[in-house]
Amino acid sequence: MGRDFELPMEATVGATPEEVWEAISTGPGIDSWFMGRTEVAGGVVRTAFGGFDLPPSRVTDAEPGRHLAHSSDKGDDGRFVAYEFMIEGRERGSTLVRMVTSGFLPGDDWHDEFEAMSKGLEMYFATLVEYLGHFAGRAATPVTEFGPPVADWAAAWERLYAAIGGVPEVGDRVAVNGVEGVVYHRNSQTVGLRSGTAMYRFLQGFGGSMIASHLLFEGGEEQGARWRAWLEQLYAG
């Protein structure tokens, strides 16, 4: 058993094709909206997330300002993930960005992994759009922290929402752990808010922990300890 999948997403952003290209094709650019830390060198995209290395993704096509595609190699079980970006300049300095993620998920439990992947990709693409609209050209420092193991995800989300004043809607202004921001995305497994100097994201980790996956345009990785302590306190007991 297993499943081929394809997840297309697109948006028009207030950034130039050159700014979009920088965001999707360079390590500092990808660091500013995707997960963890990424290096692009020698035609290979390498991403590390929370101490784990994702399979290398080899660039299969690159047309600066227009098209980028890269894919991991197929594993023995057929698993692979491929990313494709199409960029089209529009009027008044705006750009249409289309991201298509495709691949194959093996095993009888592919459905749970597919749901987690699709919800996470919705968050990452929304973050790319937000980045291009508010921080284009700037490089973020990614901070990734894992909370304690979660046994009941419904209860875990209730705790998080209580900490930010209730279940938020996109556009709401909220506060969490001493920072304020506007909610730019929420689905059943993620929530993200933007301040003037950062984007703060919480994701339901497939491994069983709430993840703080933040992007800081001021300050650095030393803030990770603060968010780790906050998660541990939130989910203590």
Image (cartoon, rainbow, N blue to C red):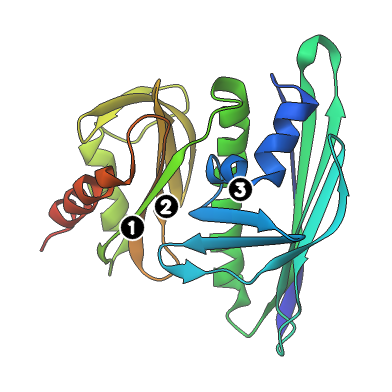
Q: CA distance from mark 3 to mark 1?
A: 25 Å
The single residue placed furthest to the top in the displayed view is: 92
Question: What residue do we see at 28% from left, 41% from top?
Answer: 161
Q: Are marks 3 and 1 in contact (CB under 8 Å)?
A: no
170 above or below 21?
Answer: above
Select label 3 or label 2 by which is in front: 3
C-alpha gap between disc 2 and disc 1? 6 Å
**Of the pair 59 and 169, the residue shown nearer to us:** 59
Q: Residue at x 61, y 40 (%)?
A: 29
Q: Report whether 100 appears left or right of 188.
A: right
Estimate the spatial distance between the alpha carbons at disc 3 and disc 2, rounded to whole Å.
Answer: 22 Å
Asked if the residue under mark 1 is in contact with the one under mark 2, i.e. CB atoms within 8 Å, the reply is: yes
Judged from the image, the secondary structure of the residue bearing numbered disc 2 is strand
Residue 6 visible somewhere in the drawing: no
**Can you give x and y, in whole percent of width and height, for residue 137 in the image?**
60, 27
Give the residue type that dot 2 points to.
Answer: Leu
Q: Position of residue 23 (x, y in %)?
A: 66, 37
Q: x and y percent of residue 142 in the render?
A: 43, 46
Q: Which residue is mark 3?
A: 27
> In the picture, which quadrant includes the N terminus?
bottom right
**Hey, what amino acid is under mark 1?**
Met
Residue, disc 1: 210
Label 3 is placed on what type of residue?
Answer: Gly
Residue that protrudes farthest toward the front in the picture = 42
Residue 111, percent across and down?
Answer: 60, 71
Precedes in sequence: disc 3 or disc 2: 3
Q: Which mark is residue 203?
A: 2
Q: Residues within 10 Å of mark 2 (few under 14, many from 20)?
A: many
Dot 3 crowding, Cα within 10 Å, few <14, some 14–19, many 20+ = some
Residue 95 seen in the current view: yes
Task: Please give the name of the residue rendered at 51% of the width and 52% of the height, measured from the top-left corner.
Answer: 35
